[in-house]
Image: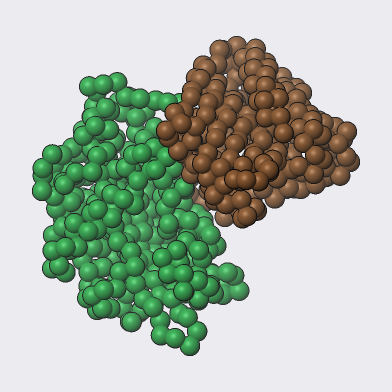
Chain colours: A green, B brown
Amino acid sequence: MDANAVRNYLLDLQTRIVKAMQQADGHSFVTDAWTRDPGGRLAGDGRTQLVEEGGLLERGGCNFSHVLGPAMPPSATQHRPELAGAPFEAMGVSLVFHPRNPHVPTVHMNVRMFAALPEGKPPVVWFGGGMDLTPYYGHEEDAQHFHRVCRDALQPFGATLYPRFKRWCDEYFFLKHRNEPRGIGGIFFDDFSELGFDESFAMLRAVGDAFLPAYLPIVERRRNTPYGERERDFQAYRRGRYVEFNLVYDRGTLFGLQSGGRTESILMSMPPVVTWRYDWQPEPGTPEARLYNDFLQPRDWAAGAA
Amino acid sequence: MDANAVRNYLLDLQTRIVKAMQQADGHSFVTDAWTRDPGGRLAGDGRTQLVEEGGLLERGGCNFSHVLGPAMPPSATQHRPELAGAPFEAMGVSLVFHPRNPHVPTVHMNVRMFAALPEGKPPVVWFGGGMDLTPYYGHEEDAQHFHRVCRDALQPFGATLYPRFKRWCDEYFFLKHRNEPRGIGGIFFDDFSELGFDESFAMLRAVGDAFLPAYLPIVERRRNTPYGERERDFQAYRRGRYVEFNLVYDRGTLFGLQSGGRTESILMSMPPVVTWRYDWQPEPGTPEARLYNDFLQPRDWAAGAA
């Protein structure tokens, strides 16, 4: 593996994404560079970049982090029990953007490399990541665009990857206790090394590079759509699902919190304002009901079929 | 065991608490009685009672539930691995009240009985529960009062119980990823059967009966304290910690969600309006800083010592 090449790619990706999002937002992101003392549980460094109360984003952040740990935590070894307790190296870029306008969907993207470093054995390296979209008021052309950019990014690495990663995303971003998907999906993969280091890393880059073309056209299309209190209320309510998913199920969040990661960077994924209401149901026939009926259902968005 | 006596006590406790809280609030609670089909994963029944946008409570609920399950979930057997997979019966009353006025603390109380029913063996019964207080603006006399009522309720069952359950509460309601307690504590116990069924159940009743005298005097003392946007902002921010604790760590919440419990009843513990802000720190010397410095520290509140 060439960990340094991965690190350089990730730092550059973060720089490019934050630059483009700042331009779209009109406000500067704050940058927090941090290093962690090797005396602590996790040694490493990172760069958190985020904006709150921006022009476009009510809250959003993009993190780079690179950590070395003495022992893999349970959340990272559930599929690889033979590596439990081994030292590890992990690096990645992770972002969540929560726009203020309820017509602009929330988006999440993550690309990461994980290397287990069992003593006296060669490192075991894999990649993970993906991106997914969480609309409040769905638009078919947005969902199609997002999925098609994902599909096209993966195409050079094999035609089976997109359908596989799309299904994986639908399965992963699912709130079992609500029997409800988090959003309209996208792609998700983990434990990925089957193409060898070089090609797997090239695929990771293709995914990272696809983020801006997947998301920015949707932002530009929706950012000036008028909205009022009703739409803001629904957005705040639906953001509760985002919180529930990330804190109850998300492997990256739990890995970070369990392994002594930097809490404020990990929880930049939390929405700015969230509400909970008892047993709330949308009125049939409303745009809110349409989200549940037409969008929070696994569909073959790239094909455009219903 | 006399499961029926426990059930009757719990239903009566819920009735008494909701009646008293309705009186304090001035608004009626909504009652949702539910039963679950034995065809599902969990059979049982329950009664959810809650109020939203009340006079005192911005959101608050008191649940009774009684379920029979085919196999104990992992969250219930971490201390009793020999019972993993056994059928079980669980019943309890659980409440969380989130007042609107930031000077009135959020409170949580739970009393429950759990019976594992391993095939061909006698049932294994234990009790659990406790109560704890989460202030936004701390008041020493409130913390002292709350802890003293807890101490006095346990006194007849042995002088060691209060210090033991108080310490357990401090350890349990702790956000490891923030290195921060959830509030000023109270009492917490689980796997409790050491006094035999009758005395253990009597202790459970003493705890349940202590809730109103522990909480209502604090409500009456603080409910008319003036507050403004600053206090509401801090309350909404601090409520984020409540969400983080309940969704990441709370055994009851995870047990409920994992075992296919009724999501809307379980998540009545979620606050009505919550905010997250990046790396927010209180200004030294402010009332907000005082919460962190003087209250979110384990202290021997019943003794009144600093």
Q: Which quadrant holds residue A239?
A: top left
Q: In the image, what residue occupies the spot 39% across and 25% down?
A: A280
Question: In this figure, what is the number of numbered marks?
Answer: 0
User: Residue B177 sits in which quadrant?
Assistant: bottom right
Image quadrant holding the C terminus of chain B, namely: top right
Residue A101 versus residue A270 in the image, above or below: above
If the image is split into quadrants, where does the N terminus of chain B sit? top right
- What residue do we see at 50% from left, 54% from top? A264
For residue B257, above or below residue A284: below
Residue B128: percent from left, percent from top: 69, 39
On the question of residue A196 being in view, the answer is yes
Write down the quadrant of residue B9 in the picture.
top right
User: Most extreme residue toward the bottom, as rendered?
Assistant: A120
Q: Residue at x 15, y 67 (%)?
A: A158
**Foreground of the two, B58 or A101:** B58
Relative placement, left or right, of B86 versus A233 is right
What percent of the width, then of the height, locates residue A215? 22, 50
Is B39 rendered above or below residue A188?
above
Is residue A8 something that shows in the picture? no
Residue A144 at x, y percent in the picture:
15, 46
Residue A171 on image: x %, y %: 31, 50
Task: Between residue B225 and residue B206, name the one nearer to us.
Answer: B206
Q: Residue at x 55, y 22 (%)?
A: B47
